[in-house]
């Protein structure tokens, strides 16, 4: 698959991702013909302060647990954001004193996906937290983006495992070694594919971020 590396046009201190041409409904599950990869890594903090997407677009943020996805979303997303961590925090506040998380985990997941469905039905641009191991979620988002005449964009945080583990310790919550290994393998495969221009089916573009570029990103929004 060939990568279109034409630079997105500048908008002040940010960039606007180019909109992909709409496809017929029967092609809604297929890949975009010309994916765009925007690599913002290794810029020593001199990367855009904002990213703007189309009004009907969807954005999925993925990376290792502890890489800073939730922190980035809380700081930079100005519109709708769906983060499974927010859902867990709400349930933890009510139940963690009485039950271990494993008991009510299915309820947290159900509530998270119900909230995502409601956000998608709004027709507005949405930024979604993705753990990287559930490709079916990206497929769902891709179908919805194409149905509404928008584009699915991927924001991939490229953070080394040691830094991600430090991030887990800082927030006081981590995943098991087995789960982290699964996440590490899934994210590594996705990163290698994106670096070669091979985006997941239905993704129109990908933005690669390292910790420095993620730290200076202050705005993720949607508009024409």
Image: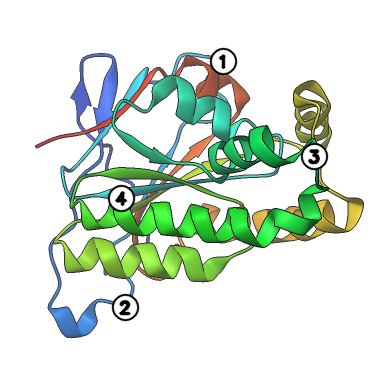
> Pointer 3 and pointer 2: residues touching (CB < 8 Å)?
no
Left or right of 106? Residue 81 is left
Marks 3 and 4, how far apart at CA: 31 Å
Disc 1 element: loop
Q: Mark 3 vs mark 4: give the one in front.
A: 4
Look at 46% across and 20% down and name the residue there: 75
Q: Earlier in the sequence, mark 2 or mark 1?
A: 2
Q: Mark 4 vs mark 2: give the one in front.
A: 4
Marks 4 and 1, how far apart at CA: 35 Å
Residue 119 is tagged as 4
Q: Earlier in the sequence, mark 4 or mark 1?
A: 1
Residue 3 versus residue 194: which sits nearer the camera?
A: 194
Marks 3 and 1, how far apart at CA: 20 Å
Residue 31 versus residue 89: which sits nearer the camera?
A: 89
Residue behind mark 2: 29
Identify the residue at the far left of this view: 224
């Amino acid at each position: 698959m060939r990568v279109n590396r034409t630079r997105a046009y500048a908008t002040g201190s940010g960039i606007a991702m180019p909109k992909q041409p709409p496809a017929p409904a029967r092609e809604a599950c297929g890949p975009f013909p010309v994916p765009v990869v925007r690599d913002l890594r290794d810029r020593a903090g001199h990367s855009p302060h904002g990213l703007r997407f189309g009004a009907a677009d969807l954005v999925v943020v993925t990376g290792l647990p502890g890489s800073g996805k939730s922190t980035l979303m809380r700081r930079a997303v100005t519109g709708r954001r769906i983060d499974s961590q927010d859902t867990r925090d709400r349930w933890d506040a009510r139940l963690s004193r009485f039950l271990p998380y494993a008991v009510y985990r299915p309820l947290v997941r159900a509530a998270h996906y119900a909230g995502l469905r409601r956000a998608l039905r709004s027709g507005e641009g949405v930024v979604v937290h993705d753990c990287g191991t559930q490709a079916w979620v990206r497929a769902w988002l891709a179908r919805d983006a194409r149905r509404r005449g928008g584009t699915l964009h991927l924001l991939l945080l490229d953070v080394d495992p040691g830094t991600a583990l430090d991030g887990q310790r800082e927030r006081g919550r981590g995943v098991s070694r087995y789960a982290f290994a699964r996440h590490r393998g899934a994210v590594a495969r996705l990163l290698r594919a994106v670096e070669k221009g091979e985006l997941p089916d239905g993704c129109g573009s990908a933005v690669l971020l390292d910790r420095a570029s993620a730290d200076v990103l202050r705005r993720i929004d949607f508009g024409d």
